[in-house]
Image (tube, rainbow, N blue to C red):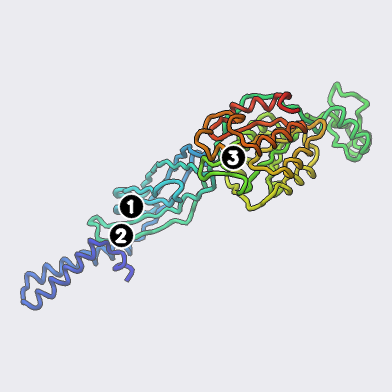
Amino acid sequence: MTGLKALTPRGRSFLASGVAALLCALVLGEHDLLRVAVLIIAMPLIASMVVTRTRYRLASTRRLGPARVQAGEESTVTLRLENVTRLPTGLLLVEDTLQYALGTRPRFVLDRMESRGVREIDYKVSSDLRGRFPVGPLSVRIADPFGLVELTRSFTVTDTLVVTPEVVPLPPVRLSGEHSGGGDSRTRSVAAAGDDDVAPREYRQGDDLRRVHWRSTARRGELMVRREEQELQSRGALLLDTRRHAHRGEGPRSSFEVAVSAAASIGVHLSAEGLALRLVTDQGARHVVDGGQSWSLLDTLAVIRQSTARSLEHGVAALRQGGGDGLIIAVLGALDLEEVQALAQLRRPGVTAVAVLLDLASWDRASGNGASWDAVADDGARAARSVLTGAGWRVLGLPAGASLAGVWPEAGNKRSAA
């Protein structure tokens, strides 16, 4: 029964024609027609038996290069098929499984593969949408040379392509902020905490003998000194407004996607400068990124979605509870007066606060594309800017169609804050 199900339309046509010829031969008593009928019926049946009983063993591997791309960029998928048996294969129809966002399913036809033979196939995929997309599983259709029988066998292994938001290179801007660890502050913390909390190391020639840690020296039997010098590391927080009602538009050009791209660009830029960054959304703390590890932030932003939250209270609370942030950057959509005032209170002495304020009115007006923020901003956006700058925030207006790189230098302009 499995063999009959594997018949192609051509195989079924042969079988039906053979049966019809057989009936005619029996009715008319034509022996020559009977021989033809038997031959026609036998061809698909024999082909079905050969294909279904032949135990092809195929090994498959898939390689993505690269496995992480920005939206709109291409990744090359390399399929490697190997015939691990001593039997040559027949015609192979290879098809890989893709989600619609990555394009149509690639199909390839491979001729006879010899024993221990290897074939490699390359194809490209790309997506304008962010996300984590499974690639695979791979299916192989085995057919006979006459195209009468086709049997599908599938592999189970899949790979994942991560499509991250678009990252815009930003010009260098000097952003002041707090630093944690190192220097005199660390020395004072050692004196306050006591010797038990110190991580000592072996004595090196030239070390100050006043830094000798005698308890560890006695325990280890060799001279140990305190680790009092640590590299300064900046800390910051990045707030992303993901509320559905706070954004406009649909698709890759919506204000939400622009906000995600802005957060990714800022995060990558600051991470490259060694900033330890916390990602916070309107739902609270989401992720912590160590300096130089921007790929983890991009992976998080690749799958972030709009929320149904109506306020920023959880995000503001997460920023307030985190503490120690010398830099706060907020990428914001629509705000009401209460939310603006709550954000304004986060700005404290010694903390640099930068707000990237999207003007949503420009997403509803075609004339807003490429225009300056002041030319298209509505009254609500201007009011939010006034309150934030009055509290010491540096506000960057970002209308639809404008480049973040073009307005980013304002983040280092102290005059943009009152």
Above or below, 146 against 164 in this view is below
Residue 375 screen position, x and y as percent: 59, 29
- Left or right: residue 298 compared with residue 291: left
Q: Which residue is mark 2?
A: 150
Above or below, 414 against 283 in this view is above
Sequence-earlier tag: 2 or 3: 2
Question: For the residue marked with disc 2, what is the amino acid?
Answer: Glu
Mark 2 and 3 residues: CB-CB less than 8 Å, in contact?
no
- Left or right: residue 392 compared with residue 254: right
- Left or right: residue 405 compared with residue 323: left
Q: Which mark is residue 93?
A: 1
Q: Which mark is residue 362?
A: none
Front residue of this view, candidates 75 and 297: 297
Question: For the residue marked with disc 1, what is the amino acid?
Answer: Leu
Q: Residue at 55% across / 35% down in the picture?
A: 400
Asked if residue 233 shows in the view, the reply is no
Q: Residue at 73% across / 48% down in the picture?
A: 313
Q: Secondary structure at mark 1?
A: strand
